C-alpha cells in the first residue's frame, strides 16, 4: 500500500518513532525495577553463570531449552555484570527493539502520525507485553527476532527483491530465535517459502542464501547435538513431554485459549486481525497475497497454532504474538483513521479506553498465574535476603538452595544437580529419583543422604521449596545437621553444624576408661 502522507519526511518519521520509544522505555524500565521475580529467571541466571565459569550446557548441568539464549546473555554479562537487573535490561531492550521496529514499519507504510502513535500505544500498553518485557526468559528474544526477521523480509519484497542484505539479516535473526527456543522452528519453513515464491527471478539464489545463514547460526546447536544426540533430544524434547510439564489434554488447552484470547486486550487485537484479513481478502487472492496483511495473518496464525500445540501451553507464550496481531489488524486502524468524525471518533475513543482498561488486569493475571504474585517473590524480599547471604557465606562456597537465583545473588555455588529448579516440579508430579538423575538433577534421596552427611556447608531455604515425599524427613535432617544463622524476610540461611569429633579425627580416637568401665569408644557429638 502506498504511503497515505508522502509529505511526511523520513526525518519526521524518525523523530516520531523515537518519541514513541520514550514511553515504551520508561514503562519497561519501571517494570524491570518493580516487577516481582519470575521463578525461571533464577535458572536462566544460573545457566549464564555456569557458562561464564566455563561449564557446558547439557553436559555439565541440566538445561531444557535450545542453547543460544544463555550465551547471548553471558556476553552481555561480561560487559555489564551478572545480575538480575542487568539481565532485565537486555530483555527490555529486546522488547523495545521489537516495538521500535513495529512502529517504524507502520510509519514507512502509512506515513500517518496518528496511526504511528496508536500502534505504539497498542504495543506498550498491552498487559501481555508489560508483564513479560523486562523478564529474563525466552520471550523477549523471541519477539525481537521474529518481528525483526519478518519486517526485513517484507522490506526485501517492497524494495524490489534486488539486495540480499535484508534476506541475510532476516535469516540471521530467525536463526538466533530458533536456536534459543525450538518452537520458532516452523518459521524457517514459512519464511523460506516466502523467499522462494516472492522472487521468481532469483528464487534459488535467495532461498539458498536464507537457508545457509539459518544453518550457519545453528552451528552451536549442531555441535551439542553431534556430541550426544540422545542427551540433546532428551533435554530439549523428552523432558517437556514426559517429565514436566507433560502433554496436557484438550480441556486444559481450551481453558488456556480462553485465558489468552478472551480478555479484552487480546480479544480486540485478534478481532481487528481477523477483520483486517477479511478487508484485504475482498480485493481478490492475488492482491491479498501481495499485501503485507496476509503475511502478518499467517505469521500470527502459525504462532498461535504452534504454541497451543506445545506440551502444555502457557499464556505467557503469547506475549510475542502481540505485534503480529497489531500489524494484521492495521487495515482496520486505517479504516477507523479515515472516519475520525462524529461516530467514528466515538468508536475510536471507545476502543482505546476499552483496550487500556484491560492492561492492569492482564498484567496481574500473568504474574499471578505463574505463582509470582506472592510477597516472597518481591524484589524487596529476595534481594535483601540474598545480600544477607552474601555477607554470611564466603564467595564461591557451596550452598544448597532449592531456587538457584539465591546462589547467583549471594555469590555462592549451587551443588551439582540443583542448578535448575525444574527438579522441584518434576518431584512434585511424582517423577522417580532414578529418572531425575538421568537429567542431571539431584533426587531427593541423594539430597537427603548429602544433608545427613552435612556435605553442603551452607543452606538457603526460601522460595521453591516444594513439599515432596521426602519433605518431612528433609526438615528433620536440616534441624539436626544445620544451624540457623539468620532469617531475612522469611528466607532462612543455615550453616552446617560441626561434624562429630569421631568423624573429624577418625574412629580410632578413644579415651582411657574410667574406673569400673570397660573399654569403649566415646559418644562425642553436638
Image (spheres, helix red, strand yellow):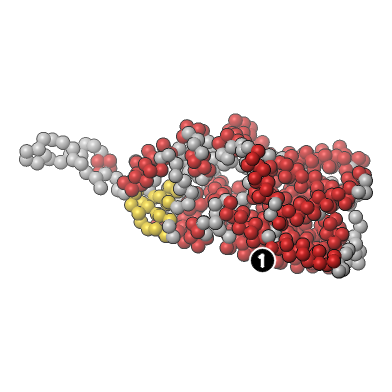
- State the quadrant of the N terminus: bottom right
Mark 1, secondary structure of its residue: helix
Q: Residue at x 88, y 51 (%)?
A: 279
- Nearest the eye: 467 or 423: 467
Residue 268, percent from left and from top: 75, 56
Confirm whether residue 125 shows in the render. yes
Q: Is residue 284 left or right of residue 455?
A: right
Q: Residue at x 76, y 54 (%)?
A: 269
Rendered image quadrant of residue 348: bottom right
Label 1 neighbourhood size at 10 Å, few (<14), some (14-19), many (20+)?
few
Rendered image quadrant of residue 451: top left
Q: Is residue 501 left or right of residue 399?
A: left
Q: How many marks?
A: 1
Residue 222, percent from left and from top: 66, 36
Instruction: Say if 408 sits above or below 124 in the image.
Output: above
Confirm whether residue 175 shows in the render. no
Residue 397, percent from left and from top: 42, 50
Q: Residue at x 86, y 37 (%)?
A: 204
Instruction: Say if 370 sits above or below 14 in the image.
Output: above
Residue 300, percent from left and from top: 76, 47
The residue sitting at the top extreme is 230
- Nearest the eye: 439 or 38: 38
For disc 1, the marked residue is 26
Amino acid at each position: 500500500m502506498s504511503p497515505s502522507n508522502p509529505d511526511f519526511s523520513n526525518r519526521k518519521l524518525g523523530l516520531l518513532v523515537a518519541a514513541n520509544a520514550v514511553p515504551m522505555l520508561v514503562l519497561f524500565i519501571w517494570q524491570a525495577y518493580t516487577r516481582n521475580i519470575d521463578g525461571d529467571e533464577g535458572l536462566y541466571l544460573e545457566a549464564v553463570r555456569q557458562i561464564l565459569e566455563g561449564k557446558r550446557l547439557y553436559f555439565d548441568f541440566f538445561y531444557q531449552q535450545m542453547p543460544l539464549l544463555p550465551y547471548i546473555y553471558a556476553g552481555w554479562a561480561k560487559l555489564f555484570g551478572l545480575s538480575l537487573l542487568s539481565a532485565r535490561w537486555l530483555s527490555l531492550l529486546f522488547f523495545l527493539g521489537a516495538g521500535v521496529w513495529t512502529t517504524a514499519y507502520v510509519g514507512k507504510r502509512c506515513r500517518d502520525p496518528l496511526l504511528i502513535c496508536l500502534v505504539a500505544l497498542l504495543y506498550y500498553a498491552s498487559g501481555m507485553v508489560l508483564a513479560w518485557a523486562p523478564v529474563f526468559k525466552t520471550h523477549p528474544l523471541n519477539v525481537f527476532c521474529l518481528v525483526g526477521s519478518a519486517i526485513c523480509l517484507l522490506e526485501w519484497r517492497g524494495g524490489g527483491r534486488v539486495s540480499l542484505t535484508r534476506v541475510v539479516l532476516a535469516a540471521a535473526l530467525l536463526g538466533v530465535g530458533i536456536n534459543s527456543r525450538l518452537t520458532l522452528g516452523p518459521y524457517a519453513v514459512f519464511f523460506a517459502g516466502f523467499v522462494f515464491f516472492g522472487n521468481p527471478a532469483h528464487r534459488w539464489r535467495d532461498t539458498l542464501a536464507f537457508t545457509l545463514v539459518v544453518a550457519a547460526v545453528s552451528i552451536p546447536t549442531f555441535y551439542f547435538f553431534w556430541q550426544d544426540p540422545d542427551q540433546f533430544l532428551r533435554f530439549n524434547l523428552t523432558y517437556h513431554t514426559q517429565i514436566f510439564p507433560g502433554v496436557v489434554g484438550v480441556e486444559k488447552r481450551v481453558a488456556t485459549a480462553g485465558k489468552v484470547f478472551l480478555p479484552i486486550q487480546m480479544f480486540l487485537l485478534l478481532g481487528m486481525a481477523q477483520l483486517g484479513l477479511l478487508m484485504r481478502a475482498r480485493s481478490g487472492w492475488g492482491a491479498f497475497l501481495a499485501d503485507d496483511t496476509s503475511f502478518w495473518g499467517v505469521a500470527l496464525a502459525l504462532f498461535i497454532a504452534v504454541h497451543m500445540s506445545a506440551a502444555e501451553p502457557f499464556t505467557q507464550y503469547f506475549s510475542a504474538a502481540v505485534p503480529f496481531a497489531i500489524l494484521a489488524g492495521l487495515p482496520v486502524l486505517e479504516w477507523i483513521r479515515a472516519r475520525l468524525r462524529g461516530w467514528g471518533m466515538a468508536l475510536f475513543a471507545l476502543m482505546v479506553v476499552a483496550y487500556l482498561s484491560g492492561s492492569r488486569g492482564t498484567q496481574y493475571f500473568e504474574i499471578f498465574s505463574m505463582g509470582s504474585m506472592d510477597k516472597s517473590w518481591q524484589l524487596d524480599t529476595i534481594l535483601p535476603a540474598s545480600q544477607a547471604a552474601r555477607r554470611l557465606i564466603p564467595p564461591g562456597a557451596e550452598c544448597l538452595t532449592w531456587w538457584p537465583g539465591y546462589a547467583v545473588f549471594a555469590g555462592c555455588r549451587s551443588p551439582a544437580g540443583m542448578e535448575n529448579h525444574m527438579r522441584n516440579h518434576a518431584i512434585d508430579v511424582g517423577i522417580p529419583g532414578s529418572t531425575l538423575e538421568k537429567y542431571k538433577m539431584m533426587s531427593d534421596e541423594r539430597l537427603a543422604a548429602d544433608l545427613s552427611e552435612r556435605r553442603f556447608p551452607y543452606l538457603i531455604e526460601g522460595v521453591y521449596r516444594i513439599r515432596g515425599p521426602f519433605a518431612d524427613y528433609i526438615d528433620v535432617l536440616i534441624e539436626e545437621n544445620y544451624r540457623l544463622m539468620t532469617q531475612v524476610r522469611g528466607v532462612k540461611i543455615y550453616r552446617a553444624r560441626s561434624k562429630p569429633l569421631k568423624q573429624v579425627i577418625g574412629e580410632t580416637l578413644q579415651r582411657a576408661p574410667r574406673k569400673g568401665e570397660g573399654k569403649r569408644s566415646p559418644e562425642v557429638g553436638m
